[in-house]
Amino acid sequence: MNIAILGYGKMGKVIEEIAEERGHEIVLKVDEDIENYQLDKAEIDVAIDFSVPDAAFKNISSCFKNKIPVVCGTTGWLDKYEKAKKICEEEGTAFIYASNFSLGVNVFFELNKKLADMMKGLPEYSVEIEEIHHVQKLDAPSGTAISLAQQIIEKYPDKKGWQLDHADKDEIVIHAKRIKDVPGIHTVTYESEIDSIEIIHSAKSRKGFALGAVVAAEFLQDKKGIFTMKDVLSSLFK
Ligand SMILES: NC(=O)C1=CN([C@@H]2O[C@H](COP(=O)(O)OP(=O)(O)OC[C@H]3O[C@@H](n4cnc5c(N)ncnc54)[C@H](OP(=O)(O)O)[C@@H]3O)[C@@H](O)[C@H]2O)C=CC1
Ligand SMILES: O=C(O)C1=N[C@H](C(=O)O)C[C@H](O)C1
């Protein structure tokens, strides 16, 4: 498979390594305004975007306009997600966005939903989320923390949204910490006067994110439509 990497930073470099190990070829590396590059459908089977929040939408829509499917892991641009989906559908190509491509986090998401389902009937417990990442991270809270919050909100009828640092009673608080070299730690805590229950996912490196993104690209290359990591994982485990 011929891959274009959009965003050749920390993630882009690990994606290159893993894609090549799996027998793919990197035919384009984009690290600045996408208008400066040629996007040729004849040469690119799929694009993988791990760039910056301000560039992601332009990168993705430029690929769609050239009928190139996109796997996107960039976080912090989701106000334009619905618009991106519409362009993808209009152009008849394919798209997967995931706030986190690692297999472990996708298992953690399922645990989070199950736990929230159990805890929603226990008003003596309050719930909060903490995420810790390296100091270069541009967005806060992390996309993964937002996904975790949204999964809990779907289970709790009285929770209306989330807030960073301080939340009202009908919101979930997310704490974001920045510590040198941390690839990503997410914790969901339920706290009562008597005890606390915590689930934690701690990434040891960026390999899990990159492998998930390359596997998602392999899944997407011959498809049309909008997909999620759940679709990718179900195709692997069937
Ligand atoms: N979904 C997931 O599983 C994961 C998502 N992420 C997300 O991926 C994104 C990238 O993370 P990371 O690799 O750590 O960040 P980096 O800052 O290391 O890499 C981003 C790269 O994008 C480049 N860039 C700047 N402008 C453009 C542009 N217009 N088009 C393409 N590339 C551009 C930057 O270049 P320059 O430095 O010169 O500006 C940089 O090399 C973040 O949003 C992060 O949150 C990260 C890990 C996992
Ligand atoms: O910026 C990062 O590094 C990461 N970003 C993603 C996020 O915002 O959730 C995923 C992962 O935690 C690493």
Image (cartoon, rainbow, N blue to C red):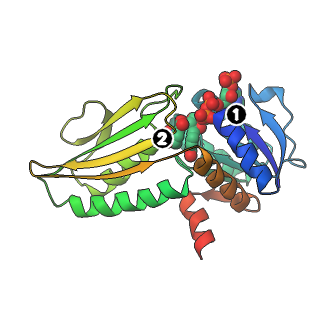
* Circle 1: residue type: Gly
In the image, the residue with mark 2 has its CB under 8 Å from the nearest atom of ligand 2: yes
Image quadrant containing the N terminus: bottom right
Image height of 18 relative to 168, above or below = below
Q: Position of residue 135 (x, y in %)?
A: 49, 26
The answer to whether 188 appears left or right of 25 in the picture is left
Q: Position of residue 44 (x, y in %)?
A: 84, 48
Q: Is residue 231 visible?
A: yes
* Circle 2: residue type: Gly
Image height of 174 relative to 116, above or below = above
Q: Residue placed at 9% from the left, 48% from the top? A: 193
**Viewer-proximal residue, 20 or 78?**
20
Residues under labels 1 and 2: Cα distance? Answer: 19 Å
Specify the label residue 74 is tagged with: none
Q: Residue placed at 73% from the left, 59% from the top? A: 218
In the image, the residue with mark 1 has its CB under 8 Å from the nearest atom of ligand 1: yes
Q: Position of residue 124 (x, y in %)?
A: 11, 52
Q: Residue placed at 36% from the left, 57% from the top? A: 112
Q: Residue 74's image quarter?
A: top right
Q: Circle 1 is placed at which residue position?
A: 7
Image height of 138 relative to 23, above or below = above
**Mark 1 / mark 2, whichever is N-terminal:** 1
Helix, strand or loop at label 2? It is: loop
The answer to whether 127 appears left or right of 235 in the picture is left
Q: Position of residue 213 (x, y in %)?
A: 65, 51
Q: Circle 2 is placed at which residue position?
A: 184
Q: Residue 56's image quarter?
A: top right
